[in-house]
Image: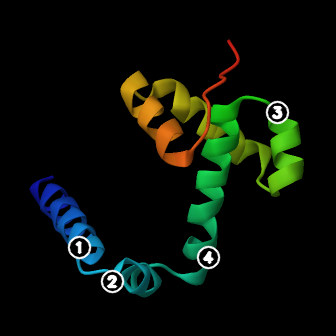
Amino acid sequence: MEDKTKNWSLLKHFLTQAVVDKQLDAVLHFLLTPEESEALPKRLILVKNLLQGDDSQRVIAEKTGISIAKITRGSNELKRIPEDFKQWLSQTLGVHVNLKPN
């Protein structure tokens, strides 16, 4: 478990330094496969749509091309995260949180 923590710390330090050195784009292209480079922005689009809460999961799937299963997993994850992190996400993604009650 210690190696996992050290490795995670190394990754965070590396990415933080990449931002400071204005190398984040190059680092992300270096670290991520083409599939991962396509999937991560889609996840952000998914989170943004879920936080807005305007559309059903089916409509989000139609608009984004993201599977219902992935949308459901994202929705469930948003339910588990702390409210302050959810607020940070919404502010950072520039959305007004309009989560529909369960």
Mark linked to residue 20? 1
Quadrant of residue 3 within the rendered picture: bottom left
Does residue 20 appear left or right of residue 24 in this picture? left
- Of the residues shown, which amino acid type is indicated by label 4? Glu
Residue type marked 3:
Asp
Q: Are marks 2 and 1 in contact (CB under 8 Å)?
A: no
Vertical order, 59 against 34 (above or below):
above
Q: Secondary structure at mark 2?
A: loop
**In the rendered view of the protein, which quadrant contains the C terminus?**
top right
Q: Earlier in the sequence, mark 1 or mark 4?
A: 1
Q: Along the line of sight, which residue is nearer the eye, 22 or 47? A: 22
Give the residue at mark 2: 23
What label does residue 35 carry, if any? 4
Q: Looking at the picture, does residue 36 appear above or below residue 80?
A: below
* Separation of residues labelled 4 and 3 (CA atoms): 26 Å
In-image side of 5 versus 78 (left or right): left
Front tag of 1 and 3: 1
Disc 3 on helix, strand or loop?
A: loop
- Residue underneath mark 3: 55
Give the mark nearest the N terminus, 3 or 2: 2
- Residue at the image point whose x is 39% and y is 33% from the top: 85
* Direction from residue 22 to residue 79 in the image, left or right: right
> Which numbered disc, 4 or 3, marks the residue that appears first in the sequence?
4
Between label 1 and label 4, give the one nearer the viewer.
1
